[in-house]
């Protein structure tokens, strides 16, 4: 048995056979595999798949999925159904290698018989949550996504055709030019967002497509057409698996295969159209004129047993029910689980699994399916354009900060107006320099919430393999540069010329560059924080704390030579961008100036003397050296950001697998940890099958029928 930790890591999957049938399987039974067909596509197999939620001493370990077996084939569309909380998303996440870190997965998942990493491009996954750049229109979102992923050799016209056809298929043409909407303006509807999510993933016709509740929030007609599109994708030789909530009977008939889950157990796995027969065989026939999927959920959702018992207890109905031998949903569910385990459907799955595993493995799947097929230069230019548009349209990203910077600069400029060179101006110039290097750069933290939103898009697209980490970082930097330049130069111009600092165009340019690079360092450091603490409030607190420490050790509040040698002087003050930025700014302003002495008649005070003896900065190196160090620190933070993102991808899966092994080892020592929960209800043979009336299936559990 293979073990795996949850999270974004890849699968660690057992060797076996594989292949596919180029979409020819649609007319075959899900469990009859024709090994003579030419195989192309993705055969996904999962064996004895369990997902555990370790409790570490606080009660029993929860099994979110319990020993599931199954497979999905190219050319067929599979539905995962079940009550809320039954484990549909957990199953999809396990198959896609995206379980969250606190869960432990055991069992095997194979694709074409091989262990493969399915995260970062191995599978296209439409998640339950719709995440987009809210400032773009639907057409722009699809266009940029297409440019990021379609092969370079596709012409512009061909790409446009793909984009327009996809929008038409998903019924998005009418709202194509509407803005999606974000925190400050309302955009397209929830259903339109859902259809956009699907459109983005079917754009490139991936071999393996997972969708978590693609029809939630859609009206029945939209749900039907959206599912029809997915069915067509499947019939094009792709493997499509979708979890689905309460499909209409028309939508239900579109599915080829069905997994019905309840409490992490398989209630039914097989052809969707045979599920009604299975329920009838098990003694719970679907009433005439009832939507089969409604019936399945009514028989398997035991979440409300207690509520119903209480309601009926108070009306006395529960005693009547017991005396009539009526069943609770928990009992119905357990009966169905037992029935399924001994049914021909479970046997067919086992045979089908063996057949798939005995096939020879297909070469080339990996190369075909690593997400994007576009070159990195095209990805870089597309991402840069997309990010620039987002930054320019989102008022909160840079514009608001630019306005605040200008207002604060006007205030600072007027407070220190015409600062001069008398004795008191020494302190004033020092304070003004400290304020600009410290607080003005610190204000850049305000872009953090928007950056967190952009990171969410990055994580989603990265997991689906749309582009790489390096391209994202570079594109983000290039698109933000014009805004940073405008912000730094406008603020510097206002303060510099109002306060009348050291005259000379090069002195002004130095001051503006110093502020620009300092702001860039703050932005880069906030990116590192965002990659480690991806929560907006916690990230802001951590970021503010970090910059606070930088301020305290920059040499303004306490001269650098007076800082405690251990830790604060060496190394903190040396790796503190603000310390270098501040001394560069002082040197730029004061070297060459002469200040009035405290006592009239004393010799004038030279700027060099003040920097060295009053402010405590070294004059051994030039101001350009200080600027170069700030630039180097900014580059280091960007590299650190890259390393953190890469480590998340490479190291985290390994750590999680180790955690999973450790946890499982720990759990196996517990007597309470058993593989399969035992059911007290004995299995009854089909010959002696009792057909339960509709009232026995739902009467006791439904207050509607209790009177
Ligand atoms: N990371 C997790 N940590 C703790 N519990 C979890 C985690 N993920 C899922 N669960 C629990 O596992 C159960 C199954 O969750 P899952 O999200 O798979 O249900 P679902 O069938 O997709 O439900 P819905 O239809 O509401 O989306 C739920 O009880 C949920 O609370
Ligand atoms: Mg779910």
Image: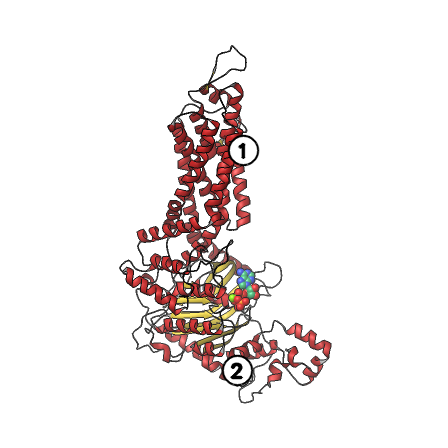
Q: Give the Cα separation between the discs numbered 1 and 2.
A: 71 Å
- Is residue 517 among the parts visible in the rendering? no
Q: What is the secondary structure assignment of the residue under circle 2? A: helix
Q: Nearer the viewer, mark 1 or mark 2?
A: 1
Of the numbered discs 1 and 2, the one sitting upstream in the chain is 2
Residue that label 2 marks: 279
Ligand 1 shows up in the quarter that is bottom right
Q: Quadrant of the C terminus?
A: bottom right
Task: Say which of 542 and 523 sits in front.
Answer: 523
Task: Say which of 373 and 109 sits in front.
Answer: 373
Quick one: label 1, few (<14), some, or many (20+) residues within 10 Å?
some
- Is residue 577 among the parts visible in the rendering? yes
In the image, is 588 to the left or to the right of 340? Answer: left
User: Residue at point 44% right, 61% down?
Assistant: 97
**Residue 292 percent location from the top left of the image:** 51, 80
Farthest residue toward the bottom?
687
Q: Which picture quadrant has residue 351?
A: bottom left
**Residue 500 percent location from the top left of the image:** 46, 26
For disc 2, does the CB lie below 8 Å from ligand 1? no
Decide: is 421 above or below 629. above
What label does residue 319 carry, if any?
Answer: none
Quick one: label 2, few (<14), some, or many (20+) residues within 10 Å?
many
**Residue 12 percent location from the top left of the image:** 42, 61
Residue that label 1 marks: 552
């Amino acid at each position: 048995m293979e073990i795996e930790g949850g999270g974004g890591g890849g699968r660690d999957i057992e060797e076996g056979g594989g292949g596919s049938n180029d979409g020819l399987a649609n007319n075959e039974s899900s469990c009859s595999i024709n090994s003579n067909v030419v195989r192309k596509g993705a055969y996904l197999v999962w064996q004895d798949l369990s997902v555990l939620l370790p409790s570490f001493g606080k009660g029993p370990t929860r099994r979110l999925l319990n020993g599931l077996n199954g497979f999905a084939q190219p050319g067929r569309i599979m539905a995962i159904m079940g009550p809320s909380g039954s484990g549909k998303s957990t199953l999809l996440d396990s198959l896609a290698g995206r379980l969250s870190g606190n869960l432990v997965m055991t069992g095997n998942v194979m694709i074409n018989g091989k262990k493969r990493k399915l995260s970062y491009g191995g599978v296209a996954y439409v998640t339950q949550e719709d995440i987009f750049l809210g400032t773009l229109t639907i057409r722009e979102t699809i266009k940029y996504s297409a440019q990021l992923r379609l092969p370079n050799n596709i012409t512009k016209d061909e790409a446009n055709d793909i984009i327009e056809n996809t929008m038409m298929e998903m019924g998005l043409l009418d709202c194509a030019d509407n803005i999606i909407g974000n925190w400050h303006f309302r955009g397209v509807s929830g259903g339109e967002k859902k259809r956009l999510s699907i459109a983005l993933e079917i754009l490139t016709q991936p071999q393996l497509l997972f969708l978590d509740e693609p029809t939630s929030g859609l009206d029945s007609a939209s749900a039907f057409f959206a599912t029809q599109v997915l069915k067509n994708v499947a019939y094009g030789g792709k493997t499509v698996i979708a979890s689905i909530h309460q499909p209409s009977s028309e939508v239900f008939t579109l599915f080829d295969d069905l997994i019905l889950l309840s409490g992490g157990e398989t209630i039914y796995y097989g052809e969707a159209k045979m599920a009604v027969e299975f329920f009838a065989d098990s003694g719970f026939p679907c009433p005439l004129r009832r939507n089969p999927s409604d019936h399945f959920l009514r028989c398997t959702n035991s979440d409300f047993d207690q509520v119903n018992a209480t309601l009926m207890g108070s009306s006395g109905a529960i005693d009547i029910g017991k005396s009539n031998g009526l069943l609770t949903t928990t009992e119905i569910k357990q009966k169905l689980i037992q029935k399924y385990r001994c049914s021909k459907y479970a046997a067919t799955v086992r045979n089908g699994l063996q057949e798939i595993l005995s096939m020879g493995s297909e070469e080339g799947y990996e190369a075909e399916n690593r997400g994007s097929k576009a070159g990195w230069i095209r990805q870089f230019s597309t991402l840069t354009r997309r990010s620039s548009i987002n930054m320019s349209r989102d008022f909160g990203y840079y514009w608001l900060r630019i306005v605040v910077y200008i207002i604060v600069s006007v205030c600072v400029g007027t407070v220190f107006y015409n600062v001069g060179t008398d004795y008191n101006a020494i302190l004033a110039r020092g304070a003004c320099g400290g304020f600009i290097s410290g607080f003005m750069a610190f204000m850049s933290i305000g872009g953090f919430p928007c950056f967190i939103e952009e990171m969410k898009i990055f994580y989603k697209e990265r997991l689906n393999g749309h582009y790489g980490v390096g391209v994202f970082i570079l594109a983000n930097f290039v698109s933000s540069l014009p805004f940073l330049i405008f912000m730094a130069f406008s603020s510097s111009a206002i303060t510099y010329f109002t306060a009348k600092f050291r005259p000379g165009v090069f002195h002004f340019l130095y001051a503006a560059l110093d502020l620009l690079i300092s702001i860039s360092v703050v932005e880069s450091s906030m990116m590192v924080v965002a990659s480690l603490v991806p929560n907006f409030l916690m990230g802001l607190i951590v970021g503010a704390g970090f910059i606070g420490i930088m301020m305290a050790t920059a040499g303004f509040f306490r001269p650098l030579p007076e800082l405690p040698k251990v830790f604060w002087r060496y190394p903190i003050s040396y790796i503190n961008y603000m310390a270098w930025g501040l001394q560069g700014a002082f040197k730029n302003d004061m070297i060459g100036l002469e200040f009035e002495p405290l006592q009239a008649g004393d010799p004038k005070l030279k700027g060099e003397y003040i920097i060295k003896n009053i402010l405590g900065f070294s004059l051994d190196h030039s101001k350009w050296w200080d600027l170069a160090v700030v630039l180097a620190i900014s580059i280091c933070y960007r590299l650190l950001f890259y390393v953190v993102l890469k480590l998340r991808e490479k190291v985290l899966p390994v750590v999680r697998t180790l955690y999973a092994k450790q946890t499982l080892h720990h759990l196996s020592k517990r007597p309470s940890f058993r593989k399969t929960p035992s059911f007290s209800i004995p299995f009854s043979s089909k010959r002696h099958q009792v057909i339960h009336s509709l009232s026995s299936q739902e009467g006791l559990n439904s207050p509607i029928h209790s009177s």
